Amino acid sequence: MVTIKNVAEKAKVSTATVSRIINGQDGYSEKTMKRVLKAIEELGYTRNALARGLVSSKSNTIAVLLPSVTSRFASELLGGIETDAQRIGQSVIICNTDFNGRRTADYLKMLAEKRVDGIIFVSEWLKEEYERTVERMNVPMVLVATFTSSYPVPYVRIDDEIASFNATEYLLKAGHRKIGMLAGTREDPVAGRPRVNGYFRALKKYGIEPEDRRIAFGDFHYHSGVRAAETLLDSAPDTTAVFAASDEMALGCITAAHRRGIAVPDALSVIGFDDTLDAEMAIPPLTTVKQPIREMGKTALELLFSEKPRSIILPHSIVERESVRRLK
Amino acid sequence: MVTIKNVAEKAKVSTATVSRIINGQDGYSEKTMKRVLKAIEELGYTRNALARGLVSSKSNTIAVLLPSVTSRFASELLGGIETDAQRIGQSVIICNTDFNGRRTADYLKMLAEKRVDGIIFVSEWLKEEYERTVERMNVPMVLVATFTSSYPVPYVRIDDEIASFNATEYLLKAGHRKIGMLAGTREDPVAGRPRVNGYFRALKKYGIEPEDRRIAFGDFHYHSGVRAAETLLDSAPDTTAVFAASDEMALGCITAAHRRGIAVPDALSVIGFDDTLDAEMAIPPLTTVKQPIREMGKTALELLFSEKPRSIILPHSIVERESVRRLK
DNA sequence: TTGTATGCGTTATCAT
DNA sequence: ATGATAACGCATACAA
């Protein structure tokens, strides 16, 4: 490998001068610059980020930890982050935790060793253990679509409970009264419970008592969506509308309905959550709660490198398509 | 930051000994090991990968370059790669090229500087320019779902032309004769042209002359799929079956049909390509050509670190679901 | 404007 | 079994 030393020799200057030129500082004549640039060119010199990082203690690399890479939510978020990351000269390494504590801990350790400049932690409840580790690493971290109760870590997310309330109320306003819910992970304090709470709150506002048989749990993913929908359709066949905690689960519901010959939205209305491309591709196109996913990624990056830590709750909205029928 | 030097002082040994212990070499007594381990624990020492990389010239990091992160193909592949990468202690950094030559070149440069241990190049034709750059970097590279004609770079892919031939013939065998195609990028020599060729070849085998009006081009993504399908449905309304060059385009076709009140598969049969989760989620569930995507990722990683460079063509298959109707 | 010298945190070679 | 020390490639404080 060719180093600045080689370049320096060839250009008959010191390594210090080469370094200055490479880093766009000043303190050299036009002439020497040209000589050095020429030497760099001829030798095919490439800067060594490892060495630079050793000196600066920076890697120009950030990490995104998420429970699953394969969901549309994850990939759209990743897309948002990656785009802006490249712009500011950061590479992003992906870490699929799979909700696995061991994998997460291993990753955190590796990231500490690699001296990443920042960590974006997505969709997963931040355990105290992780929190402490990261704090010791002395690396900035921001949470996306999740939050923490104890030590205040900056986050960017929407208000899940209000969003769910709005989604359910949307169904209510459309005249539905027998409304089921396809919930996410039961224990999940981030997107699980709050979304259920919003659903409950909306029902109560309209004087409807929530029933256990109208709510079925899954894990936000498609397959769990069809399973949960089948459970729901069995235990409460008179349901006229369903609020799903994710677009994928909503699509699972549509699949389950399709299998049983239940027409959507004619016999069953469905509203989803996320507004990923899945919602658009669905037949019928899915009415859903929109999270500004790409913007969340963008914002996370900003927060990560902003001076003073702060959190942001982004606005959500409801995108009306064709999966909800107006009753009466 | 605490270094081995600090550890050494605290444990009253030399840095050399600490290094040996950290790296599981031998040459120290049980007693000193315990002392050192204790010091490491108490000091909260973390290895510095930057420094290690500087001496070893390795980063334990690989890069995946792909034209888009947000497609299901990309994320499923990424999932496959990431899983195995973690197993062998490699982090993976993602590079979204967006088919943009400039971005790709920039990324390649950055990867060279970061001294990545390997590059996986996905879905995009490998320009000679890139090839030369990587060759100069002296970093192993493998191609996924693409290949190159000049300098032989190892690849893993399926046989796109045969797969398309099979898909088209599947339609033919089902009794269809007026078969349209929703093709990918026209100029794409990897998944564009070969898939069209396979389609042509199958038609000819059955004595059918391909017609221009029955083929519409897109870019493999959903929106282009609905546009292309609309074009096709306009120019050849008598079409009874469509072969789409990707699942997303197939879903686009279903959407277009749905908008026009054309029932799938009753009035129009559709077969896709990839077998991502999209195919499963579709209404009706999509019959499609299966690429073993996760396995391709896994294999790519193996090839990347295998002794002698070699290429692999993985088998494809047809997954029958409900989007194709048997005629007569 | 330019050069010298030191340190960044590790590994590895050579002694002891 | 253990230690001293020279790389690794670069940035930078200090001199000149």
Image (spheres, coloured by chain):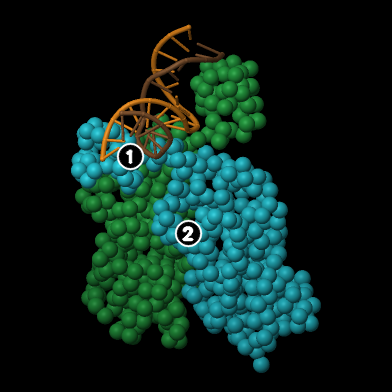
Chain colours: A cyan, B green, C orange, D brown
Name the residue: 46% across, 70% down.
B286
Between D15 and C14, the one nearer to me in the picture = D15
Q: Position of residue B173 (x, y in %)?
A: 35, 71
Between A26 and A163, the one nearer to me in the picture = A26
Please rate how many residues cluster around mark 2, counting C-alpha atoms within 10 Å: few if below 14, some from 14 to 19, many from 20: many
Label 1 residue SS: helix
- Callouts 2 and 1 in the same chain: yes
Which amino acid, by three-letter code, is at mark 1?
Ser
Q: Chain of mark 2?
A: A
Circle 1 is placed at which residue position? A19
Between A14 and B319, the one nearer to me in the picture = A14
Name the residue: 50% across, 42% down.
A115
Residue B32's quadrant in the figure?
top right
Circle 2 is placed at which residue position? A81
Tell me if I can see residue B176 in this picture.
Answer: no
Q: Quadrant of the N terminus of chain B?
A: top right
Disc 2 to disc 1, C-alpha distance: 31 Å
Residue A255's quadrant in the figure?
bottom right
Q: Check contact, mark 2 vs mark 1: CB within 8 A.
A: no
The residue at the far bottom in this view is A328
State left or right for residue A127 relative to residue B250: right
Q: Quadrant of the C terminus of chain B?
A: bottom left
Tell me if I can see residue A51 in this picture.
Answer: yes
State left or right for residue B180 relative to residue A246: left
Task: Compare marks 2 and 1 and give the one earlier in the sequence.
Answer: 1
Label 2 residue SS: helix
Residue B98's quadrant in the figure?
bottom left
Which amino acid, by three-letter code, is at mark 2?
Ile
Q: Position of residue D3 (x, y in %)?
A: 52, 15
